[in-house]
Image (tube, rainbow, N blue to C red):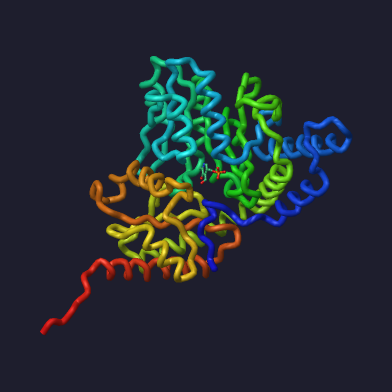
């Protein structure tokens, strides 16, 4: 059954499973305990931190704080900023952030979180960020948060340039790379002051992620034990950490091949879509996007009905983000770029998101587009009143 919901969660990579089992069986002791076997667990923890740092191009593994996922990492960032930033400080974020960033930053900066503009495709251009920084200049800017790749449309942000721009102005930059990691090379992401990742998005176990924090920051995460160099309380999930790092290493080894092949298949699917679903609008279709993601708007359709019809045709797709506010999150992305989509303001439109994985085939993509074409015909038919001959 073709699975097109990898942006929600990806199946466990065999390398992650093996690493998880080994850590759970052999290194189950608490890394903070003092006896010899705990030293082995502590060593594995240090080894995982170093390997992850290598993948991210980070020369200080101490910057990595393991968390229970990307949501937890983003919350940790928000909590830290809410206690450390000056009371009049502001934050800047893009209007298409995942709710885990959007809500955390807004809670940390009540009434002081401002949105940057995006272009017609949902991209925050460096010039746009520069303008937003100029506008906010009269107040301290505690953080700029712009995601690396969108979970909804797959649109890529020029995070490296945005991070450089912020560095030049001594403003901390955060990127949520939960969707970038495992799909595009991780190397260089540590150039961002703050960085969020999540294991289960790229074949690691669920419930494990990380936050990269600035070197030498007096980072105070939360209340509790002094784990993670005093930055994040709670016993480390060592099997999860080992599984996540093994999954990312495995993905990185074949990333370029997967990305090139995946983009070609996605583009062929778009060609087929143009023939079979001419009313479909590819979200952020003119921008650089993740090779695995294809979000399509169907004017007048209902997202949930389309996805249910696809499911009956054995295609597992999504209406957008899998979080509880998924519909709202997709709607925000669409609202941010509405004028470029040719949709009348407020006009109903259904969104279907296909997010492929490394094993998705061209035949899977073809089946997905064909099933969507059928679903669109059925949904149009359903909105017409049944014809009854009363003569
Ligand atoms: N950030 C982004 C960009 C995401 O796509 C997601 C999941 O959809 C999250 C954060 C939340 O990740 P987690 O499930 O690890 O909390």
Give the quarter of the figure containing the C terminus: bottom left
* Residue 11 picture quarter: bottom right
Q: Is residue 200 left or right of residue 140?
A: right
Which one is in front, 298 or 41?
Answer: 41
Q: Is residue 70 left or right of residue 116?
A: right
Report x, y in % for residue 385.
21, 70
Report x, y in % for residue 344.
23, 49
| Residue beneath the point at 46% across and 49% down | 321
Which one is in front, 378 or 144?
Answer: 378
Give the quarter of the figure containing the N terminus: bottom right
Query: Is residue 15 something one can see in this rendering?
Result: yes
| Residue beneath the point at 22% across and 74% down | 386
Report x, y in % for residue 349.
31, 55
Q: Is residue 68 left or right of residue 120?
A: right
Query: Is residue 263 something one can see in this rendering?
Result: no
Residue, far bottom: 391
* Residue 55 picture quarter: top right
Report x, y in % for residue 166.
50, 25
| Residue beneath the point at 57% across and 57% down | 357
Residue, far front: 224
| Residue beneath the point at 41% across and 16% down | 139
């Amino acid at each position: 059954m073709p699975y097109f919901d990898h942006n929600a969660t990806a199946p466990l990579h065999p390398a992650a499973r093996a690493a998880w089992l080994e850590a759970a069986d052999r290194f189950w002791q608490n890394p903070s305990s003092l006896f010899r076997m705990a030293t082995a667990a502590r060593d594995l923890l240090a080894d995982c931190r170093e390997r992850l740092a290598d993948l991210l191009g980070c020369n200080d593994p101490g910057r990595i704080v393991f968390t229970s996922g990307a949501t937890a990492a983003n919350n940790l960032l928000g909590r830290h900023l809410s206690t450390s930033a000056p009371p009049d400080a502001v934050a800047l974020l893009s209007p298409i952030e995942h709710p885990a960033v959007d809500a955390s930053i807004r809670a940390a900066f009540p009434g002081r979180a401002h949105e940057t503009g995006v272009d017609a495709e949902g991209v925050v251009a460096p010039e746009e960020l520069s303008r937003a920084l100029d506008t906010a200049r009269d107040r301290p800017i505690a953080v700029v948060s712009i995601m690396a790749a969108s979970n909804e449309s797959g649109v890529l942000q020029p995070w490296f340039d945005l991070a450089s721009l912020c560095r030049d102005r001594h403003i901390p930059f955060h990127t949520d790379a939960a969707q970038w990691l495992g799909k595009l090379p991780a190397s260089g992401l540590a150039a961002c002051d703050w960085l969020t990742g999540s294991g289960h998005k790229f074949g690691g176990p669920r419930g494990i992620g990380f936050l990269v924090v600035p070197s030498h920051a007096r980072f105070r995460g939360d209340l509790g034990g002094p784990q993670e160099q005093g930055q994040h309380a709670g016993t480390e999930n060592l099997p999860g950490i080992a599984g996540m790092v093994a999954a990312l290493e495995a993905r990185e080894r074949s990333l370029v091949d997967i990305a090139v092949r995946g983009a070609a298949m996605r583009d062929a699917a778009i060609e087929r879509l143009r023939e079979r679903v001419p009313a479909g609008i590819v979200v952020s279709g003119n921008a650089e996007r993740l090779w695995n993601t294809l979000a399509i708007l169907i004017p007048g359709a209902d997202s949930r009905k389309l996805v249910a019809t696809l499911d009956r045709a054995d295609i597992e797709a999504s209406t957008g983000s899998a979080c509880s506010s998924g519909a709202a999150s997709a709607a925000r992305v669409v609202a941010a770029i509405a004028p470029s989509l040719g949709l009348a303001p407020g006009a109903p439109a259904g969104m279907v998101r296909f997010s492929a994985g490394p094993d998705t085939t061209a035949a899977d993509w073809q089946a997905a587009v064909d099933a969507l074409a059928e679903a669109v015909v059925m949904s149009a038919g359903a909105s017409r009143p049944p014809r009854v001959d009363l003569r």
